[in-house]
Image (cartoon, rainbow, N blue to C red):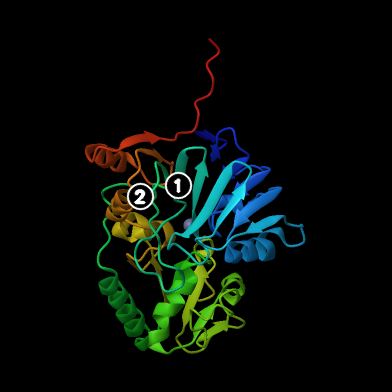
Amino acid sequence: MIEYADSSIHIKDTILWLDAVKKRGLSFLSHSHSEQMNTYHDRIIATKTTIEFYKKFVLKDVPLNALQMSYFRKFSIGDLTLTLYPSGHVSGSAQLFVKVKDSKILYSGHINNRLNPTCDEIYYPTADTLILDSTYGSNEYIFPKRDIEETLFLTYVQKNLDNGYHIVILTNPFGKAQYLISILNSLQKPIYLQNRIYQYTQLFKNEKIVDLSFIKPLTSKLSNPSILIYPFEQFEKIPFTKGEYKKIALSGEALFKDSFHSKYFLDESFVISDHADFNGLIEYVKFVSPSKIYIMPSKTDAKSLKQHLKELKFEVEELLKPKPKSLF
Ligand SMILES: [Zn+2]
């Protein structure tokens, strides 16, 4: 039923691909992140927010054939009956439920089962087959209580601003950046956004979910100690002199401060993520209660997730990149 090819999932004997990395006739785009956003498919299925992001920031002038779907609405394409459900990860992120013949398949995409003020809360559909994203699928990733980490984060920012430092926060420009804005609003200070983050944040303007009254574009050098939100990939291009600023980041990776700090030359970090942690993934699977689980490859090791789910009597298979064919 499920096939893993070219680093993407395909529902066998159908035209449907899920977050396909290579150009396909039809692909579901789960959310506005990652490499599949750079592929121009003939047709896509996605939510309104994901389509807007894809049109505006990825395709630019390339025409798009998109099936825009709302959460919880059933629709059919040939033999397939499809429904999108919120996944709680970023604005517009969706799980895809596929009914084909007698099979009920659920593709998780990136999920987050803690409340995120910038998007709809995760919904737990039940399914026979679950294709599960395994980000943070190692039992080392158990996150502390969110409100405690948020308080530590805000206290750190306030204290260092008071001591005359700029605060540079490295983040993912879509989703996490706007989530950060919603937390930082309580300090009632201007929040300067790097150009791309400022543009992405404009997508949130009409939704009125995040209060954007404190945001400002980063147009010139700042005189007063200020908060600046910056993309991870530009961590070496901070527009301040060394010693003038503190560089911090929020991620599940902050559980391992030594490696995380040395990777981005951070002064501090906090365990605030828009992904489920190990326990969150297990909880999600229990709600979906599938008879078969396919674990997708991710950047983090998923051996303990596989092991734990097997102990809970789930049938589990890892989707791995196909090995090169032997000559014999
Ligand atoms: Zn994501």
- Rendered position, 153 above or below 231: below
Taking the spot 34% from the left edge, 36% from the top edge, the residue there is 316
Callout 2 amino acid: Val
Query: Residue 106, how many percent across, how many down?
Result: 45, 47
Badge 2 marks a residue whose secondary structure is helix
Taking the spot 56% from the left edge, 71% from the top edge, the residue there is 197
Callout 1 amino acid: Leu
Which residue position is annotated with label 1? Answer: 106
187 vs 325, left or right, is left
Q: Which circle marks residue 133 in the picture?
A: none
Cα distance, mark 2 to mark 1?
Answer: 9 Å
Q: Residues within 10 Å of mark 1 (few under 14, many from 20)?
A: many
Q: Quadrant of residue 188?
A: bottom left
Query: Residue 226, how many percent across, how many down?
Result: 46, 84
Which residue position is annotated with label 2? Answer: 288
Closest to the observer, 119 or 195: 119
Closest to the observer, 116 or 151: 116
Badge 1 marks a residue whose secondary structure is strand
For the residues labelled 2 and 1, say whether their Cβ atoms are less than 8 Å apart: yes
Query: Residue 78, how many percent across, how many down?
Result: 63, 43
- Rendered position, 185 above or below 37: below
